[in-house]
Each structure stands twice: as structure tokens, then as C-alpha cells.
Amino acid sequence: MLHFSCDLCGKDLTDGRDARYVVRMEVFPANDPAELTDADLSDDNLEAIGELLRDGDSDPEPAPAYQKLRYDLCPACHQKFLADPLNREAQKFDFSEN
């Protein structure tokens, strides 16, 4: 038997009494082709590439370029997600006037 729970609030959705919503997202880098100029072709970037290779060993593992994500949501979290998919409301602070 498969077990489903809401990925935001943790509510058990296995029994099927509540609706379960699936959110699928794809994340990938935007590939806007840059226009090459004569200056780009005439630059000698061999030294810059060597620096990147030497410094690259100390950098942490980069995030994968492409990811497929899947989330199960309960009805309440589904409504919250539709109202604010990037969760911008959580980033707003309400400071008092001092």
C-alpha cells in the first residue's frame, strides 16, 4: 500500500477521505543564446579557464542543472500554494514603528 502525506503540513492523505493534489515542477537554467561579437572570438581565455579549473576543486558540488520535482498537497495547502506559489508572503516582515 502506498503512503501519501502532505509535503507542506504532513497531514496523512493515505486513507483517501481528503483530496490529494500533485504539484509537478521542472527547474532548469534559462538558455538565452548570447550574441557573439568579434571581440569575443579574439579574446584568449586560456588563462581564465586555467584559473577556473584550479579554483573549481574548492567549490561545493553545484546544483543539478535540471530537476523534476513532485509534491503531494492536502486541500488546505493546495489553496495556499495557488494563492502564493513562491511563498512571497512569508518573506514580508511587519515591523513596528519605533
Image: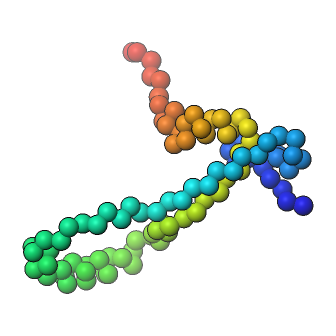
- Residue 10, how many percent across, how many down? 75, 45
45 above or below 5?
Answer: below
Instruction: Please tell me which residue is depicted at 31% across the width and 63% down the height of the picture.
Output: 32
Residue 10 makes an appearance in the image: no
Give the tally of numbered discs.
0
Q: Nearer the viewer, residue 61 or 13?
A: 13
Location of the C terminus (image quadrant): top left
Q: How is the image coloured?
A: rainbow
Does 27 sit left or right of 34 as displayed?
A: right
Q: Quadrant of residue 52?
A: bottom left
Location of the N terminus (image quadrant): bottom right
Q: Nearer the viewer, residue 42 or 35?
A: 35
Instruction: Please tell me which residue is depicted at 85% across the width and 59% down the height of the picture.
Output: 2
Instruction: Please tell me which residue is depicted at 47% across the width and 28% down the height of the picture.
Output: 93
Does 64 sit left or right of 69 as displayed?
A: left
- Residue 78, how many percent across, how many down? 67, 40
- Residue 71, how many percent across, how many down? 67, 53
- Residue 37, how many percent across, how many down? 13, 71
Residue 16 makes an appearance in the image: yes
8 above or below 42?
Answer: above
54 above or below 68?
Answer: below
Q: Nearer the viewer, residue 36 or 42?
A: 36
Does 6 sit left or right of 80 as displayed?
A: right
